[in-house]
Amino acid sequence: MLFGVVSLVLLFSLVYVEVFGALPNKEELTAVINEEASLIYSSDEVTIGKIFAENRTNVKLVQIPTHVKEALIATEDKRFYSHNGYDGQSYARVFFRSLLLRYASGGCGSTLTQQLIKNLYGRQYHGFLSLPINKIKELIIANRIEKVYSKDEILLCI
């Protein structure tokens, strides 16, 4: 058990000092832009097409019905408003149920913020350590992004 804890702390430290790749800083996180589709209009202002890498239309939070926002939080991250980007309780659940009891408990403990990070930055291959390294990166970046954006701003990016 002690070896496992020491290994995890060492791995976390190596990820934090960017041995496994750069982590975005505050300036890079504030420069995040959600791509939108470009609309093509006719001369009479009728939409006749779209050009996009990602077919998105950004909306304001007030345009999203409250029940939709609440349903997303209830199904994906019930402690969304009480954590700082990562959910220690979910990680403990995953650790004890999945690793120790070998019981699939559903999910990998990712918060909505971590899911956003995964979508923005993707995951890199690091051999057999890929999952733990990528999860640690997402944890660190999620904590940073929650210092830059409000919870509602994070919900708009998802």
Image (cartoon, rainbow, N blue to C red):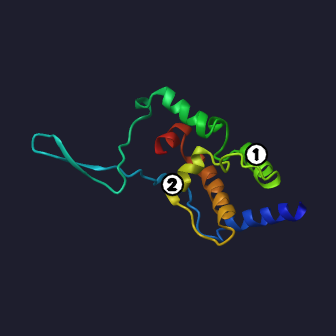
Instruction: Left or right? Give the position of 86 relative to 32.
Output: right
Q: Which residue is mark 1?
A: 93
Q: Amino acid at mark 1?
A: Arg
- Residues at marks 1 and 2, CA–CA distance in whole angstroms: 24 Å
Can you name the residue that lies furthest to the front here?
A: 103
Secondary structure, mark 2, is helix
Q: Which residue is mark 2?
A: 119
Residue lying at 52% horizontally and 43% vertically, measured from the top left:
154
Can you name the residue that lies furthest to the right here?
A: 2
The quarter in which the N terminus is drawn is: bottom right
Q: Position of residue 37 (x, y in %)?
A: 31, 50
Q: Amino acid at mark 2?
A: Asn
Can you name the residue that lies furthest to the left here?
A: 43
Q: Position of residue 130 (x, y in %)?
A: 65, 66
Q: Is residue 156 above or below residue 37?
A: above
Secondary structure, mark 1, is helix
Residue lying at 14% horizontally and 40% vertically, measured from the top left:
45
Q: Does label 1 or label 2 sit earlier along the sequence?
A: 1
